[in-house]
Image (cartoon, rainbow, N blue to C red):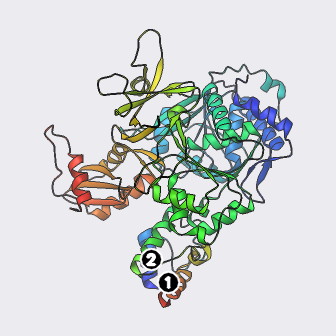
Amino acid sequence: MKRNIVEYLDEISNKYPEKDVFIENDKNKITYHKFNNDSKIIATNILKFKPLSNKPIAIFIDKSIDCLKSMFGIMYSGNFYCVFDVTSPKNRIDNIINTLKPEIIITNNKNIQKINEYNYGIDILNIDDLKYQIDNKLLNSINRCDTDPAYVLFTSGSTGVPKGSLITHKSLISYVEWFKKAFNINSRTIFGNQTPFYFSMSVSDVYSTIISGATLCIIPKINFSFPIKLMEYLNTYKVNTIYWVPSALSIVANVGTFDYAKPKYLKKVLFAGEVMPMPQLNIWRKYLPKVMYANLFGPTETTDICTYYIVNRKFKDNETLPIGKPVEGSCTIMINDNGKEAKVGEVGELFIKGSIVGSGYYNNPEKTSSAFVQNPLHNNYPDIVYKTGDIGKVNKYGEIEYLGRKDYQIKHMGYRIELGEIETNINSLKGLTICACIYDDIKSHIVLFFESNTLTEEDVYSYADKKLLKYMRPQKVVKLPKMPYNANGKIDRVKLKQDYQKGDY
Amino acid sequence: MKEVIEVLNEVKPGEDYENATNLITDGILTSFDIVTLVSLLNMKFNINISVMDLVPENFESASAILELVNKLKEN
C-alpha cells in the first residue's frame, strides 16, 4: 500500500526507465528515469533553499514538461503545489496568491520575467538555474503521511475570490487507482492530453499515466483550431486514449473532419467538464463505432470525477447522456427538498461520500463548512460528505441524470464559472450602475446586462477583455435602460434569461 | 484587404495586421480567436471555410486569409 503518489513514480521508473513518459513533440520528450531524476533535483533544491514541510508552493510555468517536473519535484520535497494559469489577468493571480500565500514560486527562464514584474515579494526558484544535484539522503529522510496534501486547484468563487480545493495523497491515490481500473489504463496506453494542468481533469490522465507506466502526449493547444492537424498529431503519436472537454470533441465533429481524416489508433474517448452535446457525440459514434465512449462527471472537490457512464446504448440527438453511477469505493446520496433520501425518479441534490472527497478549501473555513458537511442522513458519528450543489435524479436504469446547478454556477467551454465572479469584476468598472449575468444554455452564451449613463456596450466589452479570463468573457453585452427586479428586490435573472431567449434583446 | 483587417481587428484589436506574417506560429491568434475568426469570415463574406481549408498556412497573415476568402468566393 502506497502512502504518496511519488512512490508510484519511483516504482514505475525502475520498471520502465527508458520509456517516454511525457511527449510534447519529437524534440521535447522525457523518459521515466530522467523525469524521476529531474523531479528529485527540483525537490532537493527546494529543501536546500528553504527547509519546508507540507507548505504551499506555486508553479508559474506554462503547460510543458517543466511544469510536470515541478509538480512532482514539489511533492518529492514533502510539500504541495498549485499550478497557475500564466495567462490569467493579474487580479486573478493576486487573489490566488493572497489566499494561498505560497512559500516559494517556482518558474523557468521562459516565465521568470513576468512573475518578477508582478513583484509579490515571495521567494522565486528558477528550475533552469539550480545549484544542487540530488540529495537522496535528504529526500529519504522526509516523513510522509497519506493525509498530507498533494495539491490545491483553484476554481472561481461567487464573491469574486477563487476557492482552492485541497486534495491529499490518499484521495489522489484512491481516485487514480479507480480511474486506471475502470478504463484499463496500462503500459500500452498513449494519452492525448487536452486539459490544462491547473484544471482538475488533467489529474486523471497525468496521474493514471504515472501509476500505469503509460505515455502522455501534451497536444499543442493550437491543434484544436485545426482539426486536420489534430488528427495528424493523434496518428503520428499513435494516441489511443483521450479525455477531453466536450467543446474540443465538438469542434472536430462540427467541421466534418472525419470525412477527410480519422484517428487510426483511437480506442477510448472519455469526456467531462460540461454536458456533451448529443448530435456531436452521435457523429463521433457514427464514424468511429468501435471506440469506447464514457461520460464522466465530478467537481474539483472530489479529485476529478465522482460518477461515470460508459455509453452502452443508442441516444437520439435530443436526449441527454446520464452521468451514471458512482466511482467504485465512493457513494452518491441524493437528498430531496425535504432533506430525505430521494426515491427513483425524484429530483434531489447530489452529495458525494468517500476517500475521493477532498479536505476542503485552503484558508477558507466558511466556504469549507458550507460545502463539506455532515451526512444529512444521520448524526451518529462524524461523516463528512461533499454537497455538490448539483441537481439530478435516478432513471429507470438506475443511472443518475444531471439536471443542472442549484445556484448560478455554470459550466462553459469546460470551465466552471460562477456568474457572480463575472458580475463582481464588471461591477468594478467606473460609470457602471449595475450589471447581471445570465447563461443562455441553448446557445452556450454568457450574456451580460448592464445599466449606465455614460458607458457604451463597447466600453464594457473592452473592460471584460482586460479584467476577465478568456473563457469568462461574455459573448453578448446588452445595455438596458433599467434592470428588471423581482418581488424580493433582487435582479430578476429568470426574466432576463426568458426575455433574452425569446429574442427580446 | 481592408475588410479582412477589419475582421481581424474585431477578433483581436491592437495588432499590426498589415505586416504580420506569423499570426499562428507566433501565437498572436489563439485557438479561441481562430474559432471566432472563422465564423466571422463565413458570415461577412458568405463563404464556407471547410475543414480542409482550416490549416495554419491559410491564417498566418491578412493576405493569406484574403487569398482563402477569394478562392472560396469563386467556388
Q: Position of residue A281 (x, y in %)?
A: 51, 56
- Above or below, A483 against A156 in this view is below
Residue shown at the point (37%, 23%) measured from the top left: A341
Q: Position of residue A33 (x, y in %)?
A: 83, 41
Dot 2: chain letter = B
Under tag 1, what secondary structure?
helix
- Classify 10 Å Cα crowding around label 2: few (below 14), some (14-19), many (20 and above): many
Q: Are marks 2 and 1 on the same chain?
A: yes
In the figure, is residue A463 to the left or right of A502?
Answer: right
Label 2 sits on what residue type?
Answer: Leu
Dot 1: chain letter = B
Image-quadrant location for residue A265: bottom right
Q: Position of residue A136 (x, y in %)?
A: 83, 28
Q: Which residue is mark 1?
A: B69
Image-quadrant location for residue A451: bottom left
In the figure, is residue A105 to the left or right of A1?
Answer: left
Image-quadrant location for residue A2: top right
Residue shown at the point (57%, 72%) measured from the top left: B23
Under tag 2, what secondary structure?
helix
What number of labels is visible? Answer: 2
Label 1 sits on what residue type?
Answer: Val
Q: Which residue is mark 2?
A: B41
Q: Residue furthest top?
A: A380
Q: Nearer the viewer, residue A475 or A441?
A: A441
- Classify 10 Å Cα crowding around label 1: few (below 14), some (14-19), many (20 and above): many
Q: Position of residue A175 (x, y in %)?
A: 61, 32
Q: Do the numbered discs 2 and 1 sit on residues whose CB atoms are within 8 Å?
A: yes
- Quadrant where the C terminus of chain A sits is bottom left
Mark 2 vs 1, N-terminal side: 2
Q: Nearer the viewer, residue A150 or A413?
A: A413
